[in-house]
Amino acid sequence: MVIQAGSDLAIVMDEQAVILGLAFGNSELYSKNLQAWVGKNWEETVSLESRIKVQTLLKDAKESGTSRLRQINVAIPGAADLPFLCAAIYLPNSKRVVALYRDLREVSLLQQRLIDAQQTIELDYARLRDMETRNRILFEIASSENIIIDSTHFKILEANARFVEIVGEPIKKIIGKSFLDYLAKKDLNTVREALTKARYGSEKIEFTATFNSSNMFLIAAPFRSANQALILISMKVVQDTEITGVNSSQALALFALENSADAFVVTNLQGMIMSANHAFRKMIMVEKPEQLLHESLEIWLERASIDLKVMLSNLQAEGSIKLFATAIRDAFGAFHPVEISASTMTSPKTCIGFSIREVGSRIRPQYQVGQGISRSNEELTQLVGRLPLKEILNETTDLIEELCIKAALDLSRGNRVAASEMLGLSRQSLYIKLRKFGLNDPSKENDLEQ
């Protein structure tokens, strides 16, 4: 009774480890499978990996009377092995061995739950690390200037590369500095109120301010990290089309220009696009305005850099151009014949405005070279029999060459540098041919030497 009460299962064996009987201290363990152990060797009742442990338990019990505790698994046919904590006692007077079993199923279940919990925690940590990595990448590569500040003193805790670039200071100097230090004095109270509102609210706050001498649009979004209240600030330079302080008539003019039937593009003095209206985006089949920003206008011109150089050269000399004939290439490679008028502006910012009107096939038959060639045909046929064929071919080549040079000069509006690029000639070669055909203008000979 004592043995039965002190264990969940007790097994009595002879010296050869043959089971003589069982006593159940835990009624839940009672089963026909265990009752069938009587008459079997103890090793046959355990799993293969536990048989060495059983042999060690018997050896220790016979040598010292009591073995130390070992965990063994009991094999149950058609079911999972049962884990037990086992010790063996040798009774020399009766030459019997008693094995005491303590059921470890609850402990094993708790251990399994602990392992599952640890794995779940590891997976959660891995997901958090992945999320943090993704957020860090997005924070760095964003097209806007992003910083993270504390919501109490508004000190900068993190800043992305674009913010560092616009500030022009090393990142080590920026971190720990108050965000308010970069703002104009007139905006301090407004920004402080907006950030305080964001701190105690749950929604993003939008406002404008002069940051580092630039007019900026800012979005402040509150969030918490490690039980700390933080604010993410995203900034973007206000585009020229968003310049504040325009009167109602100017605003109407800007609205009308954006919705004009003719395309309109604003570039800097080098031809880099700063703004483009809906008609231009529709013409070149580009949906979003930001896809055009900081791209050169020459990408969409028929003769690319040649057309742009001719227009910029004339704008520099005269300040404006009218009805410059070319074609616009859309995103799919199709050409749209257009006439371009342009003028240079100095206020509120130095730039060039290009007005582009699509004219279809109306613009194409501008060079009526057919009549000249037709008349030359009559003259050339009269030379047959008078001159060798080689000399007649030379006459024809000279005629075509002269017509091409005249066309290039017309297209470039007399700009010989642009004309030489159109024809694929060096400037000196063009100069020689102009003299040959009597097309040279002495007042413009210096541009070939530059």
Image (cartoon, helix red, strand yellow):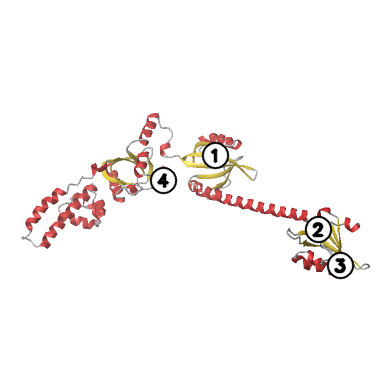
Question: Which residue is located at x 17 percent, y 47 percent?
Answer: 368
Judging by the rendered image, the residue that carries numbered circle 1 is: 220
Amino acid at circle 3: Ala
Crowd class of label 3 (few under 14; some 14 to 19; many from 20; radius 10 Å): many
Residue 273 in the image: state x and y as whole percent. Answer: 37, 44
Q: Residues within 10 Å of mark 4 (few under 14, many from 20)?
A: few
Marks 3 and 2, the one that precedes in the sequence: 2
Q: Which label's residue is closer to the chain start, 1 or 2? A: 2
Residue for badge 4: 291
Q: Is residue 127 left or right of residue 96?
A: left
* Name of the residue lying farthest toward the right: 93
Helix, strand or loop for disc 2:
helix
From the image, state whether disc 4 or disc 3 is nearer to you: 3
Q: Inspect the image, locate mark 2, and give the three-letter code of the amino acid beneath it.
A: Lys
- Measured in 3D between alpha carbons, the distance from the residue under mark 3 to the one under mark 1, in whole angstroms, is 75 Å
Residue 302: tell me if it is visible.
yes
- What residue did someone put label 3 on? 61
Camera-near label (1 vs 2) is: 2
Q: Name the mark on residue 32.
A: 2
- Location of residue 55 with respect to 108 vertically, above or below: below
Q: Quadrant of residue 24?
A: bottom right
What is the C-alpha distance between the residues marked 2 and 4?
A: 79 Å
Q: Residue at x 64, y 45 (%)?
A: 226
Q: Residue at x 41, y 37 (%)?
A: 241
Badge 2, how many Cα within 10 Å: few under 14, some, many 20+? few
Question: In the visual, does 333 lie left or right of 238?
Answer: left
